[in-house]
Image: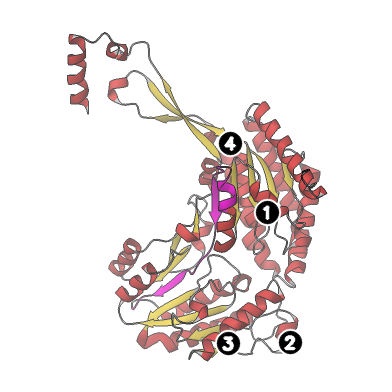
Amino acid sequence: MDQPLKSPPLSALDDLFHAMVARSRSAPPPELAVRRARLTRLRDLIAVNEARFVETISADFGHRAAAETTIAETLFLLTEIKHTIKRLAGWMAPRRIATALQFWPANNRLIPQPLGVVGIMAPWNYPLQLTLAPAIGAVAAGNLVMIKPSELTPRFATLLKELIAAAFEPTELVVTGIEDGVAQAFAQLPFDHLVFTGSTRVGRIVAEAAGKNLTPVTLELGGKSPAIIDVSADLDEAAQRIAYAKLLNAGQTCIAPDYAFVPEAERDAFAACVHNHMLGMFGSNPANTDYTSIISERHYARLEDLAQDAASKGASLLQRATPDNPAWRRLRKFPPTVVVGATPQMAIMQEEIFGPLLPVMGYRDRSEVITYINAHDRPLALYWFGTDAAARNEVLARTISGGVTINDCLLHFAQINQPMGGVGTSGTGAYHGQWGFDTFSKLKPVFYRSPLNRMADLYPPYGAKIKWIEKLLRWMS
């Protein structure tokens, strides 16, 4: 029986992918000047069109605070590109690796090579930054790159596709469409490396599809990232920093603090303090242009269900307005909400919130906190507030997370010399700076044998010489 024809978008996707594979396999690895030129084009594309990115992303959200797009997306990317261009020559150079004494005077080198074609499946919450940040590392490593934007940000996807097409050759760096079926077909392509950023549920599907081709994957997922307020913490300072991190992008941030653990005696006071800081930063008017909308009606309804479930199970909600208020719902602005007295039985404590709701839980002893965190999936981020070094180090030693910020939130992500990545259900692999270059490179070990080395004495026929060499090797080992 004849196979059904692919729809034109999927057929074009397949053809383009194979053209990129053919180019990557036939051409020599791009030289430093070529890679720098590609990165410079990407930098100029972002800088020149910054206002257009701000406008289209805001339109996709319903409203996105302009400052959030500038700080968290465009400036972040421009900084990373500058950092990469400056250091790229050193990253590309063969790396000297120590050689064991018995092989002297030979030497070892680790030679970075491009993998080939890298695929990037981008999310909607930071559509520009989480699309192009992995692309920077992939381009720097000498790869060709294919990008699939999120269908929830169609205006942004159209703009990025247009701008990339004008600045790059189709088999150099390309943005695909977002038509039905493209995401599934994209994940099934046999890339040399595939990056996916999104939910854990979809990440499992992507990993399964990639696994059929033995495609290595970098998964940037999410999870429930805790904020721990130690008894030694300044409650007001911690509340202010958590309030900001929770409401940045209206909480639609994969490393946002998902819930807070506070000493039992301070729970209610802390919750009130966080809510006051939320109102101080973003006010109580849904028309406030500093406050970002929820991406869709479906996501708004999901958050509303979480709040209602918590209230029905005994939690107290600190809200200046309810989400069913027409003024807030019309703009898809979800009122900043603190959930006091959250319990593990509530839905809000069983799934990633991804919105401006902060559950607050009390604890009597920090061992309770560590036990709770370790009994659940490993989070993408963890935040600890306080001045007690022993307490801090115990939490760091006994918990595992993708990254940690001490006495603040989110800032570990902005450290360009540190890797960004999850662990377990919060992700696998990492990128940023040289970590991204290495992720998208094959670091090929090469051994250069010296003609002066006597390893040939190990060849048969064996005789008395082998005994002497055995003794020498045992002594060296």
Whether pointer 4 and pointer 2 mark residues with C-beta atoms closer than 8 Å, the reply is: no
Between residue 10 and residue 385, name the one nearer to us: 10
| Residue 354, position as x, y percentages in the image | 58, 71
Write the start and end of the magenta stretch as one range.
Answer: 207-231
Q: CA distance from mark 1 to mark 3?
A: 34 Å
| Residue 163, position as x, y percentages in the image | 79, 49
The residue identified by callout 1 is 184
The residue identified by callout 2 is 327
Q: In the rendered picture of this protein, how many numbered marks are placed on residues?
A: 4
Amino acid residing under circle 1: Gln
The 10 Å Cα crowd at callout 1, few under 14, some 14 to 19, many 20 or more, is: few
Q: CA distance from mark 3 to mark 4?
A: 49 Å
Is residue 445 placed above or below 367 in the rendered structure? Answer: above
Residue positioned 32% across, 61% down in the render: 397
Residue positioned 49% across, 88% down in the render: 272
Q: Quick one: label 4 or label 1, which is nearer the N terminus?
A: 4
Q: Is residue 239 visible?
A: yes
